[in-house]
Image: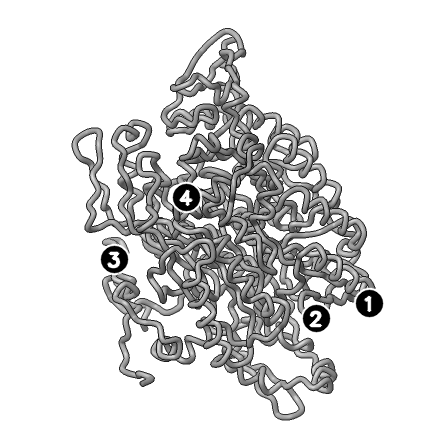
Amino acid sequence: MPGIGIPKLADNLPPIVKRNYGQWISHEHVRPGVIKHDSKSGEACYSVRVGMPTNARVSKDTLLLFCDLADEYSEGFFRITQRNALEFVGVDSKRIEDLIAKLKEMGFPVGGTNHSLHQTVSCAGWIHCHLAATDPAAIMKSLSDELINDYLNERYPAKLKISASGCINNCGEGSTADIGVVGVHRDLPPLKEEKLGGCELPLVMSVCPTSAIRSKGQKTLEIDAERCVHCPACSVACAAMAPIGSAMGDGVAIVVGGKAANTGKGPAMAKVVIPYLPNNPPRWPEVVSTIKKIIAVWVNGARQDERVGDWIARIGWEKFFQRTGLPVPMKIVDGYDGRSLERQRASVRFRW
Amino acid sequence: MEWVRLVCAHCGFTIERYTDEELKTVPRKAKRYKYLLSKSNICPSCLGSGRLKEVRSATAEEAPKAVDAKSSTAGEKAHAAPTATPLSDELSKGPWPSHTTELKKTKYPIQMYEEALKNRTTQWGYGGYVSLPGVATGVLVRSSARPEITKGSNFVRIMDPCGNFFKASSMRKLCEIADKYAYGLLHLLSTGGDLEMLGIPTENLKAAVQEINSIGFDVGSTGDDYRTSEECIGPAKCDVTLYDTLGFREAWYNRFLDDVQYPRFPHKIKMKFAGCPNDCVRGGQKADIFVCGVFRDLPKVDQAKINEWLKKGARITDIVARCPGDAMSWDGKKLTIDGDSCMRCMYCINKVPGIRPGDDLGVAILVGGKMRGKYGPMLGRVLVPFVKAVPPDYKEVFDLLERITEVYDEHARKKERVGDFIYRNGWDQFMKWCGIKPTPMHLAEPRTNLFIHWEADEIKDERSKAQ
């Protein structure tokens, strides 16, 4: 029964890591997908990074194959990186090519390090979630198919991270990435009155960001359609408000310029540049072509080591929209609350 | 001895049971009991939601529950009778590893996904977190809007080992459990930092959790508690990490495991630990409480190493030009870093082998990052600019974390994330509650308005001080 906690750190590290724990002095990108870490002791540790299916849902058959590879090449260990890639740590430098060839045969690419397209992150979406307005896994799969050569080669000015979330809950971290895709709803929550009995009505009212949900008498609620911002907050809190969304209403928004690192202009959330694109399964051509266009403009315009957010900060939003040719709809002007004033320009230093 | 059972009001399924004596003597169980009664729960058996009913009896036995194999939540039926899936097949093509290929290898009802792609909307129904007898957190249910394909799908969250290192041997056992009790599908790393085992029928849940426990893994991290903490790879594989993130996380689990497994806060609290300001775990953006390694002295410059690096054809002038603080200068022979301009942002350390972080190491604590909440995405803000992280128990840092959650627990509204709570109350109020004195390190800039409130007892004659 629970109460065990996580596996003990000391028993759960690969031998090479255990020997050199905290002793690393430098690292080097040997080739795309392979990183070499040098230790004080003179030992070198090679890590091989493998692309996983988008959203990292893997069948046990495939995982067992990876377990066999781990036994053969990396002393019985592998790890999952923060961006859902799988990493073999401590591979013998002479056998790396061998491992990569085997992985290629299995259909898994090796890459996504340094100045390349890193593995995409996406949430469960339509595979397993009731809130998703779009299917991030399919979008990221379509995009990764098109950009596979950018994953296998390091040919960007800086690293590029693309993430996709199915709704604005952002489990897929769309708003943290250089370029993000976030599913958006445009319908009102259904408000099934017969199911309201199982909900805490005050809670449903209080979670609404715009106070669009009000009480109507003692036992029912009403929704102010004018104020609804179509976030799924009430759908999470109450079964009567779920599912939100419809085939016609749902779609995706594109956000750009998110970044966690303190380098460059520092950490930032991504900003909305396209408020809505339609869902078009199975390949989402509109979304994929828009993202490819943004990437092409960034690759052309950015200086070395300049991530998307830093590039836009340097050239300004006017140049970003000019170069990409994207329209500027009223929906991307923020009018949500007091903080939104800070997003409007106070200077007249325009880059015409 | 009298037994107290909390049962689902709809179907009578026992959610938790206690003895009368336990409730009086074990505070943790009493707290948990009170909590469960105070909120609306989702029953893992019938998926109905609502308040629980309390039943007192002389025996611990529960009412016999009929389990109909046909109504099981596993997707066996859909798997056994495959129909055409043209849209999923389209997604199996292409050079990138395909998720639909993986889904089709398992017992996942692929028809649910196919229908979603066809109808352009999700086919799953409402879901949420449930508690099983003895398993307070870690189990999630998801009902289906298409009962003719599958009734629903439950899954468990398994807390990842430090550094997300998996032994092939234990992964094989996890695969075996996933195959025996569930779809045979594992979600390797949820963005919260857990491993998820998908598609466990309700009647298998408890057995699956027991078996997961028996191989040394534990479930948790759902509901209004500490979620699984995530850490960067730190000293295991990184050459610039400023504290032992993996050891820190293990110590954190040793101290806070109960809070991960027994929900008691107003809302979830996510914690992330990054070894340096590069923030590989995206803690500043995603975590309610973010512990980030920092250093106070200047980066160390090893001129000999830089010269060696330059001989390989590298260009130091590019790095100097791109320094975010404009703190570096290069006179053709020697690199100097200006102490007044350096922001310790890690850029030069990432790029130049001869520049290393300083020696005065510690951690900063940032609070209030989140992705949605009530007031939209927010970045975490500095609450503690520098505190020493001293192994093995990291008492000073953990006490601070506990202080933050106490303040949050005491003053926040229900279902209000830390960032929203601070936004509603103001940073000055939050810092007062936490007992933190402001320093310049806290401020991006001081306020521009002068709408400052003074209490009556703060107004006194201060002329003598000025002289």
Closer to the chain start, of discs 2 and 1, is: 2
- Relative image position of residue B403 (x, y in whole percent): 47, 46
The image quadrant where one finds the C terminus of chain A is bottom left
Residue designated by label 4: B122
Residues marked 2 and 1 touching at CB (< 8 Å): no
**Which residue does the image show at 27% across and 34% down from the upper left?**
A192
Pointer 2 chain: A
Residue at the spot x=22%, y=50% of the render? Answer: A227
Tell me how far mark 4 sits from mark 3, CA to CA.
Answer: 54 Å
Q: Are marks 1 and 3 in contact (CB under 8 Å)?
A: no
- On residue B454, the disc is 3
Question: Mark 1: which secondary structure?
Answer: loop
Residue A5 visible in this rendered orientation of the protein = yes
Which structural element holds mark 3?
Answer: loop
- Mark pair 4, 1: CA separation: 53 Å
What is the secondary structure assignment of the residue under circle 4?
Answer: loop
Q: CB atoms at circles 3 and 2 under 8 Å apart?
A: no
Q: Which mark is residue A31?
A: 2
> What is the C-alpha distance between the residues marked 2 and 1?
21 Å
Q: Which residue is mark 1?
A: A42
The residues tagged by marks 3 and 2 sit, at their Cα atoms, a distance apart of 62 Å
Residue type at the position of mark 2: Arg
Instruction: Choose the circle earlier in sequence order: 4 or 3.
Output: 4
Q: Which amino acid type is shown beneath numbered disc 4?
A: Thr
**For the residues carrying marks 2 and 1, which lies nearer the camera in this image?**
2
